[in-house]
Image (cartoon, rainbow, N blue to C red):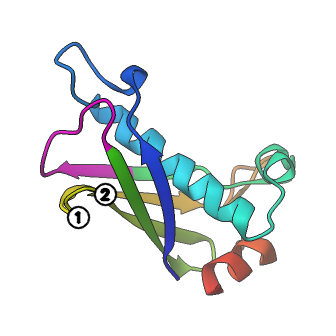
């Protein structure tokens, strides 16, 4: 499954040099992830406030190919993949809409844990369905 998210770079996304601040690329990727969950019918309020399990990001990385500037239109494509019963990752491609040029790629790795014990547990059925869609 591949999901797609359209995003315009805003002034607040940039640094003093006028280019996107590196950490904000991960924030944009997370926006794409959240939109994908909502599109799949997952109630975000319940998902992110579930008190019994949580799915934190345990690893992330970004590689940059070209600078991004305020006003640039982006296409963020995410490809989630289940790694085992408690873990999945999402590979992102950040693409310039105007030129179809790849601007960055990113990865986030997520692990499902029980919030009370902080031990790994199986991914919930809602996430498994999202991964299969």
Rendered location of residue 66, percent (x, y): 13, 46
Q: Residue furthest bottom?
A: 132
Where residue 100 is drawn, which disc sits there? 1
Vertically, is 32 above or below 121?
Answer: above
Any magenta on residue 9? no
Rendered location of residue 94, percent (x, y): 31, 57
Where residue 97 is drawn, which disc sits there? 2
Rendered location of residue 80, percent (x, y): 50, 73
Answer left or right for 111 relative to 90: right
Q: In which quarter of the image is residue 13?
A: top left
- The magenta segment: 60-72
Vertically, is 58 above or below 19?
Answer: below
Q: In which quarter of the image is residue 87?
A: bottom right
Label 2 crowd (10 A; few <14 / some 14-19 / many >=20): some
Q: Which residue lies furthest to the left in this view?
A: 65
Rendered location of residue 118, percent (x, y): 70, 50
Q: Which secondary structure class fits the magenta region best? A: loop
Element under disc 2: loop
Answer left or right for 85 relative to 88: right
Q: Do the residues labelled 2 and 1 touch (CB within 8 Å)?
A: yes
Q: Which residue lies furthest to the front in this view?
A: 98
Label 1 crowd (10 A; few <14 / some 14-19 / many >=20): few
Residue at coordinates 31% horizontally, 57% vertically from top-left?
97
Element under disc 1: loop
Residue at coordinates 25% horizontally, 56% vertically from top-left?
98
């Amino acid at each position: 499954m591949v999901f797609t998210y359209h995003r315009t770079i805003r002034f607040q996304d940039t640094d003093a040099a006028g280019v996107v601040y590196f950490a904000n690329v991960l924030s944009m990727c997370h926006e794409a992830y959240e939109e994908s969950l909502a599109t799949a019918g997952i109630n975000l309020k319940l998902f992110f406030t579930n008190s019994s399990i949580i799915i934190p990001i345990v690893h992330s990385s970004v590689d940059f190919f070209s600078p991004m500037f305020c006003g640039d239109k982006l296409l963020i494509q995410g490809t989630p993949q289940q790694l085992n019963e408690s873990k999945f990752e999402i590979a992102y491609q950040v693409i310039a809409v105007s030129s179809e040029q790849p601007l960055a790629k990113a990865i986030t790795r997520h692990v499902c844990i029980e919030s009370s014990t902080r031990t790994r547990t199986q991914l919930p059925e809602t996430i498994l369905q999202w991964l299969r869609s």
